[in-house]
Amino acid sequence: MAFKIHEVASISGLSIRALQHYDKINLLVPSSRGENNYRYYENKDLEKLQQILLLREMGFSLNKIKELLIMSSYDRQPALKAQLVFLEKQANRLNSLIELVNKTIESMGGKIKMDSKDLFKGFDYDSMKEDQKNYEDEVKERWGDTDAYKESADRAAKYSQGDWENIMSTQSEYLLELASLFKEGVSADDSRVQIIVNNNRFLIDKYFYSCSKEMFAQLGEMYVADERFKSFYDQIANGLAEYYREAIRFYCK
């Protein structure tokens, strides 16, 4: 079944102008054109558009989305699983915001009293800080006496909400690329995988602490040994945690 551009706009919620722009930059080119250069989209085009919109929700630029979609290793299944992890976090955030609004309404009606800190619970930045707090005692116990911990704590304390959103978006980008290569069956020592591993190491080095190869190798082992990390990677693609560890081992040789 073929869809005209105005039908795709109606189905997707995008404007006709946006779809024309996607065509112009070769991000979403319709399968065929009819008389007067009318655009006709097939089901495969709609599936691709869904991926574009999901990646946009994850914070990727149109240029980056275009790069990802033309990768020979790009696979919708691991990509969707990575996006599911992201959307579940968004859903948790929205549930927190719904709870916040309900409490605020009750507070305005005099049913409950909210202090100043409660007024801002549920926003992205605050949720991220709360997650950090949940692991703070364990992190201090394991690495509190190390220079890396002190350096990371000092840097993190200075980051704004925009800084954290940028870090999370970049990490999501690397994870999506890694999952696609894993799904394709690319060897962990392949240069494409090693580039991602290298980028991840320097992301840590840039934003958190000086990450030597020895320290990075220890992190790789933790991604499998610690069930929380393993579960995080494996829910995107079963076996991804071990794959990432093997890639890090090769990188750190």
Image (tube, rainbow, N blue to C red):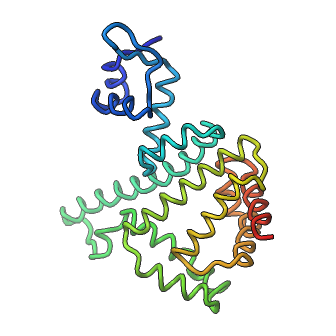
- Location of the C terminus by quadrant is bottom right
Q: Which residue is found at the position 77% from the left and 67% from the top? A: 225
| Residue 139, above or below 9 | below
Query: Relative to residue 57, is residue 203 drawn left or right?
Result: right
| Residue 66, above or below 89 | above
Q: Which residue is found at the position 59% from the left and 49% from the top? A: 176
Q: Position of residue 237 (x, y in %)?
A: 69, 47
Nearer to the camera, 9 or 93: 9
Residue 224 placement: quadrant: bottom right
Nearer to the camera, 221 or 117: 221
Query: Relative to residue 25, is residue 6 drawn left or right?
Result: left
Query: Relative to residue 101, is residue 151 drawn left or right?
Result: right
Q: Which residue is found at the position 33% from the left and 25% from the top? A: 9
Nearer to the camera, 181 or 162: 181
Q: Which residue is found at the position 48% from the left and 43% from the top? A: 65
Residue 106 placement: quadrant: bottom left
Residue furthest bottom in the image: 145
Q: Position of residue 185 (x, y in %)?
A: 76, 43
| Residue 128, above or below 169 | below
Residue furthest top in the image: 35
Q: How many numbered discs, if any?
A: 0
Q: Position of residue 7 (x, y in %)?
A: 34, 18
Q: Where is residue 97 in the image (x, y as percent from the top left)?
A: 35, 57
